[in-house]
Image: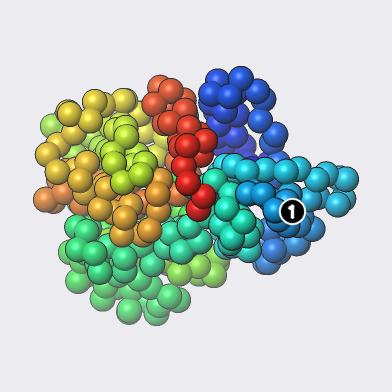
């Protein structure tokens, strides 16, 4: 079950993994049918009910005459700004014993809202760069935080994806431009001190460690030629798979701690070895666009739904 309005592509990778593991094509449902509605779209009209005594649920979409019994549901590729609209569905799946790694309502919320993630990391002692949350600050307030963090910072929206509206800020003029961008969107935002995460030849880089069931599963290194752009594939970074044994010391454990801090059974953690080893963010639904991701991540992730206990 994914948002069929998304063009990210994870749906296809997950369907391929499910077919490979079960020998059958999975049923693909549009998660928008089960959204409760909100500022980003109307209620979808989907319903969830128990299947009459056994484990699992019946997923109904009256507008399409659909009633599907399910004991395992993969819930994925949901844009961050619409995830809260699936909370009722997530609770129903858990209540009825459906096998799913996508029912952690609190974990989705904490990881999707970077303000909450920063708080979770602080409570759990997970290392991160000094970060301050801003909500419609005055120019003077934003400038004070910028100066306090050393005048070399990254600005990012509280809720976002793919590096959109993320800015490297080193001047007051750039700070004003970023503040205006977030003000137009009515968005809260964060300023975080730069981690100085450069390769020996001056390129920006970071690691992404995928965690499943509390253990590091896969690592890749993202390298960005433009030091003022975030290390996202959507913003021009290049991803290279990396054996877990070749990760800088402590990063696998740091990724595992960050995933646990926000309360997720599965996630991909962006982090850097520089500045003592720091976490940038936890991604609820990492995309499967990097080389080898289907075999290394999608297959074991789907397999966990076939083997995992309910919830």
Q: Residue at x 72, y 43 (%)?
A: 69
For the point 56% across and 57% down, which residue is it? 94
Side of 95 where 149 appears, left or right = left
The residue nearer to you, when weighing 270 against 103, is 103
Decide: is 105 above or below 166: below
Q: What secondary structure is found at the residue carrying circle 1?
A: loop
Q: Position of residue 157 (x, y in %)?
A: 44, 61
Q: Tell me where residue 77 sits by quadrant.
A: top right
Q: Residue at x 48, y 57 (%)?
A: 104
**Going by the image, does 8 lie left or right of 253?**
right
The residue where tag 1 is placed is: 52
What residue is rendered at 31% in x and 25% in y?
A: 241
**Can the viewer see residue 81 in this picture?**
yes
Name the quadrant containing residue 68. top right
Q: Position of residue 217 (x, y in %)?
A: 32, 34
Residue 123 or 82: which is nearer the viewer?
Answer: 123
């Amino acid at each position: 079950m994914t948002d069929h309005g998304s063009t990210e592509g994870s749906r296809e990778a997950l369907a391929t993994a499910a077919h490979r593991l079960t020998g059958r094509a999975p049923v693909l449902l549009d998660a928008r049918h089960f959204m409760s509605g909100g500022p980003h779209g109307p209620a979808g009209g989907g319903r969830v009910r128990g299947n009459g005594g056994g484990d699992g649920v019946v997923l109904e979409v009256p507008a399409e005459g659909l009633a599907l019994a399910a004991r395992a549901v993969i819930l994925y590729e949901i844009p961050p700004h619409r995830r809260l609209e699936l909370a009722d569905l997530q609770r129903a799946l858990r209540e009825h014993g459906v096998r799913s790694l996508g029912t952690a309502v609190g974990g989705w919320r904490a990881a999707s809202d970077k303000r909450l993630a920063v708080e979770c990391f602080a409570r759990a002692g997970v290392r991160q760069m000094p970060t301050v949350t801003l909500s419609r600050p005055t120019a003077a307030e934003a400038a004070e935080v910028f100066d306090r963090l050393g005048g070399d910072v990254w600005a990012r929206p509280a809720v976002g994806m793919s590096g959109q509206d993320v800015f490297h800020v080193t001047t007051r003029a750039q700070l004003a431009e970023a503040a205006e961008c977030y003000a137009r969107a009515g968005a809260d935002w964060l300023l975080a001190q730069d981690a100085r995460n450069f390769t020996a030849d001056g390129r920006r880089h970071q690691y992404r460690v995928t965690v499943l069931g509390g253990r590091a599963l896969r690592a890749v290194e993202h390298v960005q030629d433009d030091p003022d752009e975030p290390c996202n594939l959507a913003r021009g970074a290049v991803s290279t798979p990396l054996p877990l044994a070749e990760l800088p010391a402590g990063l696998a454990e740091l990724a595992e701690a960050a995933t646990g801090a926000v309360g997720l059974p599965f996630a991909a953690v962006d982090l850097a070895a520089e500045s003592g080893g720091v976490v940038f963010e936890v991604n609820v639904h990492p995309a499967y666009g990097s080389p080898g991701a289907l075999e290394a991540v999608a297959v074991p992730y789907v397999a966990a739904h076939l083997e995992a206990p309910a919830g």
